[in-house]
Image: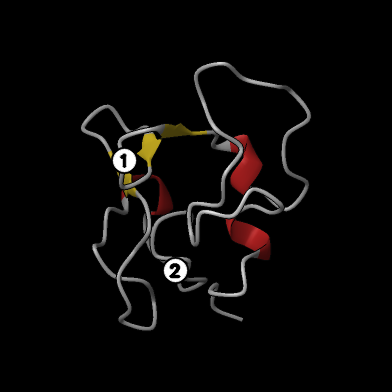
């Protein structure tokens, strides 16, 4: 899940938990429109969060991990994600 970084069964596309699977604060949240945003309000690329990432450069969505904010990986490869 790009919000809570959990691998447990839940509605991933609706998740907007303020905490990660381990109880620590979440880095990103979902807008009412369903977009991923970081704490500064910048839109994050949803494809970047997947295991293979995204190869398309965006002007409106950042290639930034929704779990920790780093730009070298997405949520599925984040060290904060549930194993």
Q: What is the x, y in percent for residue 24? A: 33, 78
Which residue corresponds to the image point at 37% horizontal and 32% vertical from the top-left? 35
Please determine whether, in this image, residue 58 is positioned above or below residue 5: above
Color encoding of the figure: secondary structure
Q: Nearer the viewer, residue 6 or 62?
A: 62
Is the residue under label 2 in contact with that under label 1 (CB below 8 Å)?
no
Please determine whether, in this image, residue 44 is positioned above or below residue 25: above
Q: Quadrant of the C terminus?
A: bottom right
| Distance from Cα at disc 1 to Cα at disc 2 | 29 Å
Which residue corresponds to the image point at 44% horizontal and 68% vertical from the top-left? 9
User: Residue 45's quadrant in the figure?
Assistant: top right
User: Disc 1 vs disc 2: which is toward the camera?
Assistant: 1
Which residue corresponds to the image point at 78% horizontal and 29% vertical from the top-left? 55
- According to the image, label 1 marks what residue? 40
Which residue corresponds to the image point at 57% horizontal and 44% vertical from the top-left? 64
**Residue lying furthest top:** 59
Q: Residues within 10 Å of mark 2 (few under 14, many from 20)?
A: few
Q: Secondary structure at mark 2?
A: loop
Q: What is the x, y in percent for residue 10? A: 38, 63
Q: What is the x, y in percent for residue 76? A: 63, 60
* Left or right: 48, with 31 as reference point: right
Q: What is the x, y in percent for residue 72? A: 71, 52
Instruction: Count every numbered label the image shows and give the total.
Output: 2
The circle drawn on residue 52 is none
* Left or right: 16, with 61 as reference point: left
Q: Residues within 10 Å of mark 1 (few under 14, many from 20)?
A: few
The circle drawn on residue 9 is 2
User: Residue 3's quadrant in the figure?
Assistant: bottom left
Q: Secondary structure at mark 1?
A: loop
Marks 1 and 2, the one that precedes in the sequence: 2
């Amino acid at each position: 899940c790009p919000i809570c970084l959990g691998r447990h069964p839940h509605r991933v596309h609706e998740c907007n938990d303020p905490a990660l699977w381990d109880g620590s604060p979440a880095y990103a949240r979902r807008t009412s429109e369903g977009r991923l945003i970081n704490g500064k309000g910048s839109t994050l690329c949803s494809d970047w969060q997947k295991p293979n990432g995204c190869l398309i450069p965006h002007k409106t969505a950042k290639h930034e991990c929704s779990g920790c904010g780093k730009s070298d990986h997405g949520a599925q490869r984040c060290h904060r994600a549930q194993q």
